[in-house]
Amino acid sequence: MPVAMPQSDGAVLARRAEIVAALERIVPGEGVIASEHAMRPYESDGLTAYRQLPMVVVLPGTTEQVAAVLAYCHREGVRIVPRGAGTSLSGGALPLGDGVLLGMAKFNRIRAIDFANRVAVVEPGVTNLAVSNAVAHAGFYYAPDPSSQIACTIGGNVAENSGGVHCLKYGVTTNNVLGCELVLMTGEIVRLGGSHLDAAGYDILGVVTGSEGLLGVVTEVTVRILKKPESARAALIGFTASEDGGECVARIIASGIIPGGMEMMDRPAIHAVEEFVHAGYPLDVEALLIVELDGPRPEVDHLLNRVQEIAQQCGAVFYRASTSEQERMLFWEGRKAAFPAVGRISPDYYCMDGTIPRAKLPFVLHRMNELSAQYGLRVANVFHAGDGNLHPLILYDANKPGELDRAEAFGSDILRLCVEVGGVLTGEHGVGVEKRDLMPVMFSEADLNQQQRLKCAFDDKGLLNPGKVFPTLHRCAELGRMHVHAGRVAFPDLPRF
Amino acid sequence: MSENLKPRYHAEVEEAIRWALAGDKTLEVVGRGSKRGIGRAAQWDATLDLSGLSGITLCEPAELVLSAKAGTPLADIEAAVAANGQELAFEPMDYGPLVGTAGGVGTIGGALSANLSGPRRIKAGAARDHFLGFSAVSGRGETFKSGGRVVKNVTGYDLCKLLAGSWGTLAAMTEVTIKTLPRAETEETVLVLNLDAATAAKAMTAAIGSFVDVSAAAHVPAVAAKRIAEIAAAGTAVTAFRLEGVAPSVVHRKGLLEDLAGPFGGLGTLREEVSRALWRAIRDVKPLAADGPAGACTIWRISTAPSRGAEVGNALAQRAQAEVLYDWAGGLIWAALPPSDDAGAGLVRAIVAAAGGHAMLVRAPAAVRAKVDVFTPEPAALAALTKRVRNSFDPQGVLNAGRMWAGV
C-alpha cells in the first residue's frame, strides 16, 4: 500500500475487548461485529487495491445509537470510519486497524415523500436508485445518478458530493439536497435546512456535502425530487479527430444548449464497448459523442436538429439520433458498460477522475498518449464532456510485478496534468486515500491548513475518518495558533479616505 | 469617524487585515455598500472597502465560467455575460430599492457573500449553486483559496458554500469564479387573476411538480399588485408563472400551463419585455420599496416549504397586520410589518417556526437591528458549531464582527 495510513494506536488496540463491550451495550443484539471472518467484507471499498481490517464494526439503527457511539469514541479517543455501501472509488471508506467502522446500512427507510414541495426525506443507507424508484409512480425522480446508483447510498452521495451523467443540467448532490440531520463527533445532533430552500445561517450542509465523512455523520437527508422530463432523445456523433469532438461540444454549449447528458469516448473505449455491447457504435472514429436532450417533445426535436447542424459544421462523420426509447437506451447501454467492457480487455484497470477546462482536451489526450507510451500501459478514455470531467481508464495486470505501481504513477501524472492545464484532481470520485498525497499539487500549505482548521471546528481530536483527504495531519492546537504580532506587522501603506 | 482602508490589490487586503489584527481592531467589510444596512447593527473600528479590486479576469463562455475580482460591479459582469448570450442563472436580486440604498451598484463579492438569488431559485438555485472558486484573506490575515475554475470539482472541502451567505464574517474574498449559463431565447409569463393565497399556493405547487417546468412562480396580493406597473391594471391579486426556453418549447408548455391553471381563475399573458420587467420588480420586491407606500414598514424575509407559504402569510397578515408577497412558488415570503421597537420578531418567528423555515429581518432602523436578532437564533449545539466555524477562519473576530449574531 503506497499511501501511508495513520499509525495504529497501540493503547487503543490493547483496550479492544473493553471497546467492543462498550459498543455492544450501545447497540445490542447483532449490531456489533468483532470476528475477523465477519469483518472481512468491510476491509475495502471500491478502491480494492487498498485493504485493512477494522478493529470492530458497529451497525447502529437509530440516530441516538450513532450519537452514543460517536460520543463514546470522542470521550475515549477512538477513531471512526463511516461507511455507506462501500462503493467509494477513492478509498473514502477504507477502515483503520485501530478504528471503529461505522456501517450505516440499517438506515434504509424512506421517511417521507412530499410531492407538493418536491422533497423526499430519506435515511442515509437508502440507495440512490431506491429514491428514484420510490417516487417513480408519480413521475418523479432524484436527478444525481452516479454510475454506482444501484448500490451506492444517499449518505455516501452526500459525503462525496456525487455527480453522474446528468449533472451538467441538473446539478450534483449539493444542488439537490435541502436538509439533513447531522451527528457531530461529540455526539451532539444538529438539524440543517429542511423542506425550505435557503440555509438560515452558515451553509453548514453545503460544506458537509463533499466532506468525505470527515466532518460528521448524516442520519437523515432531505433531497429535492424532480418531475421526470416528458421525453428524451439521444444522438451518437462520431469524429475522426478528438479536436473536432471537443469543438462540437463547445459549440453546442455556445449555441445556448445545455444537454441532459453529453458524453465522449475515445477509440480504445469505443472498441472495447462495441465488442461487448453491440450498441451500434462506429468503429472508424477517434471520438464518439452521446448527446441527450430531454424535456417537452417539441423542444427536444427542435434542439436535436440544431445539434445535428452543429455536428455537421464540426465535421462529424457519423450521426444517428434515437427514434425510439429502446434505441436511446441502447446508446446509453454502451456508455454505461464502459468500465466492465474495459475490464474484459484487460485483467485490471484503474479509473481516474480529473476535471479540465474542456478546451484543453486535445492537449490532454495527446499528453496522455505520450505518457501511455512512456509507462507502457494502455489507456481508454470516457469523458463527461459537458463539464470537462475525464475518466481515463489505465489498463494493467496486477499479477505482473510492478504494473500496479506503474499504473498508479501514470494516474498521478494524469492528475498533475489536469491541474497544470487549469483543472482539478477530482471531479466526482473524491480525494479519499487515493489522491490524498497529490493535494499539494493543487493547494498551498495555507489552503490546506485553512481546510484543516475547519475540520477542527467539527472534530477537535481528529477522530473522524483520519488519513483521508489531507496529506499531513496537524493537531488542532497547532493549527489554531496565530502568528501575527503587533511589533512585527508594518502599518499598511494603503489608500485611506 | 472610522478609518476607510481601500486596498488596490490582493496583497493590500492581507496587509489591511494584519494591521487590524495587530491593533486589535474590527473591520467592516464592504463592496460598494448596497447591502450595508442589512444585518445586526454593530460598530466597527475601520472599513475595509473592496471596491478597488475590480475587473473581469477570465471569461470563457464555452467553459461556462467567469472569474472576476471580488469588487467588480455585478452590472459589469451581467453585461459581459449577456454579450455572449449568457446570464447568471441565479438571477441575483438587487437589495438597493428595498433597503433604500442606490440601486444597481452591488458587487459580485457582495452577491456571493449574501448568497443572493431571485425568482429562478426554484429551478436554478442560488449564488451558492454557481460559486466555483475563490481567493480570499481569512480573519487570520492569511491568503487561501478553494474550489477551481471548472464546473465540476470535489477536491477538498467546498468552502464556496460556506462563504456564500456568510455576510463577510469568515474571509475577505479578493477574486471569485462563477458559473455562467446560456440565457433563454425567449420568455413569456402566464397570469392567473384573483386567487387567494391558499388557492395560489395549490396552483403554484401543482405547476412546479408538472411538465410545465416553470422558471418562476409568484403570488402578488391585490395591494402589492397595484404597485407593479406591468400588472396594476388587473386590479386583483395576480399569480404569475414564467416560462423560459426556445420558442417551440414555450408555446408547448404554455398550453400545458393554461390547462393546469385555467380551472383556478381568469388568465392573462405577458410577453418578453413586459415579462422581464415584471420579474425584475418581483425579484427586487418593488411593492415594498423603501421609497414607496410601505417604506416605513419593517421588512422580513421568510423561507419556508412552498406548500406552507400561504399559512405563514395569512397568519402574518392576521396576527401581525403584515402585507405580504410570495415568490418561489410560495417558499419565499416578503412581509412588511408596521414599524415597532421589536420588529414583531417574537410573533414572526413563532409563526415561521410552526410551519418550518426561518425568518431574517431585512429592513429596520439600526436601533431595532441592534436589539433584535436579525438572523434566526440557532439551537445551542448548532450555535456553538457556528461559533467554532467562525473562529476557524477568524479567531479574533476581526471581519464584520457581530453582523450575523452577537459574538459571531
Image: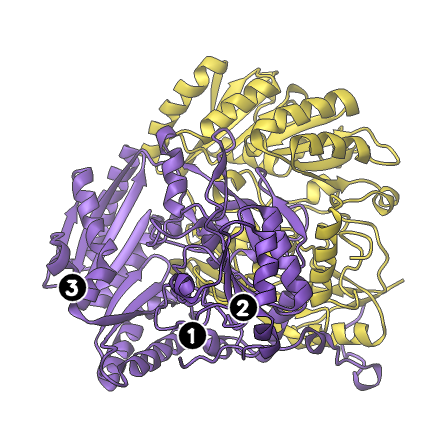
Chain colours: A purple, B yellow
Asked if A280 appears above or below A359 in the picture, the reply is: above
Q: Quadrant of the N terminus of chain A?
A: bottom left
Q: Mark 2 or mark 3: which comes first in sequence?
A: 2
Marks 2 and 3, how far apart at CA: 41 Å
Give the residue pinned by disc 3: A272
Q: Nearer the viewer, mark 1 or mark 2?
A: 2
Q: Nearer the viewer, mark 2 or mark 3?
A: 2
Mark 2 falls within which chain? A
Residue under circle 1? A419
Q: Residue at x 52, y 78 (%)?
A: A471
Which of the image's four quarters has the C terminus of chain A? Answer: bottom right
Which sits in the foreground, A131 or B218?
A131
Classed neighbour count for the residue bearing mark 2: other residues with Cα under 10 Å, few (<14), some (14–19), many (≥20): many
Residue B310 vs residue A303, the one in the foreground: B310
Left or right of residue A335, residue B242 in this image = right
Image spot of residue B47 (x, y percent): 79, 63
Residue B53 visible in the shown view: no
Name which residue lies at 45% across and 53% down.
Answer: A157
Question: Mark 1 or 3, which is nearer the eye?
Answer: 3
Q: Earlier in the sequence, mark 1 or mark 2?
A: 2
Corner quadrant of residue A198: top right
Name the residue carrying label 2: A99
Residue type, numbered disc 3:
Ala
Residue B283 in the figure: left or right of residue A162:
right
Residue B304 visible here: yes
Residues at discs 1 and 3 in contact (Cβ within 8 Å)? no
- Give the quadrant of residue A86: bottom left
The residue nearer to you, when weighing B120 against A265, is A265
